[in-house]
Image (cartoon, rainbow, N blue to C red):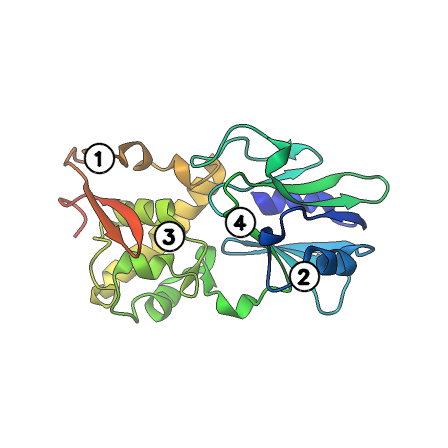
Amino acid sequence: MYRRSAEAVLGRVVQRVDAPDAYYIKGGVSPAQLAEVLVGRTVTGTERIGKLLLLDLDHERHALGLRFGMSGRIVVDENAVIETLQYSSGRDDPAWDRFALHFESPGGTLRINDPRRLGGVELAPDVTKLGVDLFQATPAAVRDHVVSSSVALKARLLDQRSIAGIGNLLADEILWRAGLDPARPANSLTVAETERLSRHIRSVARQMLAKGGSHMGRLQPARERRGRCPRDQTELERRTIGGRTSYSCPLHQV
């Protein structure tokens, strides 16, 4: 979704860079150094690997990586493809603009508005640290990158070095639909369960993208204390797994 929005700036030349929040610029590069590289460069393409959006530039060594966290939104030419995020604010406060590209004629901007500062911008990010993209999570990829570990299944799904692009809400939704306990060891999955998990990773990702985000899942309204499973009305179990609050059904997730 954010990638499609960013495609509107293809072919545009960067005229000015606004980076008022130095904390938001990652990778040991200062805002001034980042601007020095970007100004005068043309956006030639877009890519997405997991949660990382890449803007390709007409530069032999550099691409610009954008991460949004749970609270960052991309706004292109003052159009926001997502107006409100579950864990953010519905306001578009200019004080929350952490980064912006301003373009030469015909003009326009691409900016990141992020009240909680959970995202970041990085020049030439190391994409080799990311695992297979969730849309390419075939049974073989899940077997090699998830089921090869003895850690908790949900923790493995959240590890971006394993499967890139799965966050907390999406992991809970996937495992709820797949009927798998998030706390069980990943390497305990059978061949059939591995294939089922692979199928649900890709199908849930497609559905949430079409609906506007991972907060649109069927489990989401019940993710609260004493919430009940939408499938069988069993009270959900609330645990911390992989450092994140997790909700699962003790009846059908085994």
Question: Residue placed at 81% from the left, 39% from the top?
Answer: 107
Q: Up-down: is 234 above or below 118? A: above
Question: Residue placed at 40% from the left, 65% from the top?
Answer: 162
Q: Up-down: is 129 above or below 22? A: below
Q: Residues within 10 Å of mark 4 (few under 14, many from 20)?
A: many
**Could you tell which of marks 3 and 1 lies nearer the N-terminus?**
3
Task: Describe the element under mark 2 as helix, strand or loop.
Answer: strand
**Could you tell which of marks 2 and 4 lies nearer the N-terminus?**
2
Q: Tag 4: residue type?
A: Gly
**Could you tell which of marks 2 and 3 lies nearer the N-terminus?**
2
Task: Describe the element under mark 4 as helix, strand or loop.
Answer: loop
Q: Which residue is mark 2?
A: 63
Q: Which residue is mark 4?
A: 119
Question: Residue placed at 18% from the left, 33% from the top?
Answer: 226
In percent of width and height, residue 100 lies at 69, 44
Q: Quadrant of the N terminus?
A: top right
Q: Could you tell whether 242 is left or right of 91 in the image?
A: left
Q: Residues within 10 Å of mark 1 (few under 14, many from 20)?
A: few
Determine contact: label 4, label 3, CB under 8 Å: no
Q: Residues within 10 Å of mark 2 (few under 14, many from 20)?
A: many
Q: Which mark is residue 225?
A: 1
Q: Tag 2: residue type?
A: Ala
Q: Quadrant of residue 149?
A: bottom left
Q: Nearer the viewer, mark 3 or mark 1?
A: 1
Q: Which mark is residue 201?
A: 3
Can you name the residue that lies furthest to the right here? 105
Q: In whole angstroms, how far apart are the C-alphas of marks 3 and 1?
A: 25 Å
Q: In whole angstroms, how far apart are the C-alphas of marks 2 and 4?
A: 17 Å
Determine contact: label 1, label 2, CB under 8 Å: no
Q: Tag 3: residue type?
A: Ile
